[in-house]
Image (tube, grey):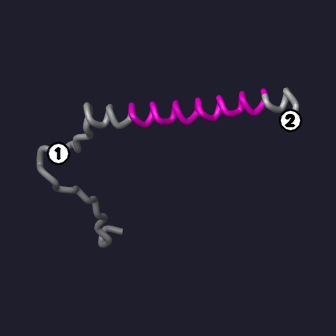
Amino acid sequence: MTQAIEKALEIAGIGIIGVFIFMAIFYLLILALDTFLPYKEEVSAEGNSVEVETEDETQN
């Protein structure tokens, strides 16, 4: 192989490794945030009641 191709493959390999390292760090950051700041579902004051609006068909 020529020296240019070898250098191009080296640069491409470093770029791919860099992307995978970034993705791993980002994934670990998401896991850490989920651990320290867990999701808490908000519950209304009336409990788990769901209000459904219905139309009275006799009024039409």
Numbered circle sitting on residue 36: none
Numbered circle sitting on residue 44: 1
CB contact under 8 Å: marks 2 and 1: no
In the image, the segment drawn in magenta is 7-29
Identify the residue shown where x is 52% and y is 30%.
22
Which mark is first along the chain, 1 or 2? Answer: 2
Spatial CA span between label 2 and label 1: 68 Å
Callout 1: SS: loop
> From the image, which quarter does the C terminus lie in?
bottom left
Q: Residue furthest left?
A: 46
Q: Which residue is mark 2?
A: 1
> From the image, which quarter does the N terminus lie in?
top right
Coordinates of residue 2 in the picture (x, y in percent): 88, 31
Identify the residue shown where x is 25% and y is 37%.
38
Dominant SS of magenta comes to helix
Q: Is residue 11 above or below residue 54?
A: above
Q: Quick check: is 4 in the magenta stretch? A: no
Identify the residue shown where x is 65% and y is 29%.
14
Q: Amino acid at mark 2?
A: Met
Q: Quick check: is 24 in the magenta stretch? A: yes
Along the line of sight, the residue nearer the viewer: 48 or 18: 18
* The image quarter in which residue 13 lies: top right
Answer left or right for 14 relative to 52.
right
Q: Is residue 19 above or below residue 53?
A: above
Q: Amino acid at mark 1?
A: Ser
Along the line of sight, the residue nearer the viewer: 34 or 24: 24
Answer left or right for 2 relative to 46.
right
* The image quarter in which residue 59 lies: bottom left
